[in-house]
Amino acid sequence: MAVLDVSGLNVWYQAPDGRQMHAVRDLDLTLEAGQRLGLVGESGCGKTTVLNAVMALVPPTATVSGRVIFDGVDLLVPDEINARKHRWTGLSLVFQSAMNAFNPVVRVEDQIAEPMVVHGLRDPRAAVRRARELLELVGIAPSAGRRYPHEFSGGMRQRAMLAMALACDPQVLIADEPTTALDTMVQAQILTLLDRLSSELGLALLLVTHDLPVVSQLCDRAAVMYAGRIVESGPIADLYHSPAHPYTRMLFDATPDVLSEHAVASIPGSPPPLNEERTGCAFAPRCDSAAEVCRTEPPPLVRPGSDRLAECHRPGAGVDRPARKAHHV
């Protein structure tokens, strides 16, 4: 059963020169209760914009259309008040930069307690007690909550951000690059913590990252995003072993794997400008398997398997190239 259903989502940004930048294009996304879904793609493909639109946190210069259905309610209508009822209580967000997400002049435990007070779930004193319990849940001494954000290490700030996201007992946890700027050991600790918390609390997890091994380790399914659209989705193991879209295959080819004999191969070129008008597949100029139809006609939506979707004229093209030795999927 879908706990979050996004359909026909479009987001435009107003550029200073008046141009409309089409960042997300007719995107569909479904997250089921208890499911772990990874949203992957290169920087600039629109991943964070999707999260901000789902949370109704886009800036005033953005225009949003489509539907974001949570608990039977469309969060995009009629106004901010409607979305605010479900923000943190139903859907919560772990921001990409925990240092920037915290108020530097407010103690950490007070910031974790604030959403509970705002939503009327606890009085201020009870909210602070719960904040300390949440800090302990994520592996931080409750007494540390009296400190300010700058007194926390990067890993501690990320853990505290997780505690804040859990403050109002949400059904869906959205994590935007939760291991960015952390060293390898701390990254592993944060991922282990996400794994444990989502299992113990029964959370549906939407993980946004460009790190494919992270998705392979933590998620059941993945949605591959390119130029504002999801070009392929399905079980992560299926996408790794038999990618239908050339972009999915090339993303995995560009991912280092110390346990594989496969040589890392970069993807040539760069994603198209957001204001570019498109007639064919947006990935065609960079694709190693593109045909003439890819440059002139929009790609159809195909089903490479019973539980998979891809937008491609030539699904599976290039998969007969030398295979990798898969160890982590």
Image (cartoon, rainbow, N blue to C red):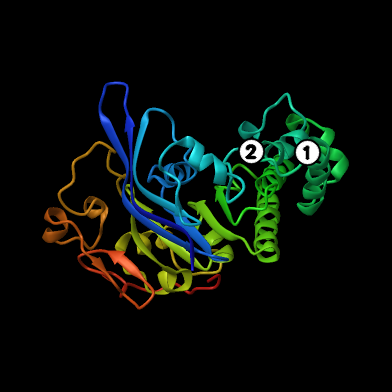
Q: Residue at x 12, y 60 (%)?
A: 293
Q: Which residue is mark 1?
A: 123
Residue 142 placement: quadrant: top right
Task: Estimate the x, y position of residue 305 in percent, counting from the top left.
Answer: 34, 77
Choose between 228 and 121: the one closer to the eye: 121
Q: Which residue is mark 2?
A: 98
Residue 237 lies left or right of residue 137; in this view the side is: left
Instruction: Bin the neighbour count of mark 2 within 10 Å (Cα to Cα): few under 14, some 14-19, many 20 and up.
Output: many
Mark number for residue 96? none
Q: Is residue 216 left or right of residue 192?
A: left
In this view, the residue in front, 251 or 258, is 251
Of mark 1 and mark 2, the one earlier in the sequence is 2
Q: Position of residue 209 (x, y in %)?
A: 50, 51
**Which amino acid, mark 2?**
Ala
The answer to whether the residues at label 1 and label 2 have Cβ atoms under 8 Å apart is no
Dot 1: what SS? loop
Q: Amino acid at mark 1?
A: Asp
Looking at the picture, tell me which residue is in the foreground, 178 or 263: 178
Q: How many marks?
A: 2
Q: Is residue 319 above or below residue 43?
A: below
Residue found at x 47% / y 68%: 236
Q: Is residue 198 left or right of residue 10?
A: right
Outermost residue, top direction? Answer: 17
Splitting the image into 4 quarters, where does residue 103 fall?
Answer: top right
Q: Nearer the viewer, mark 1 or mark 2?
A: 1
* Image position of 20 with respect to 36: above or below: above
Disc 2 element:
helix
x, y percent for residue 256:
50, 59
Looking at the picture, how far across and down is residue 205, in whole percent? 56, 58
Q: Quadrant of residue 15?
A: top left
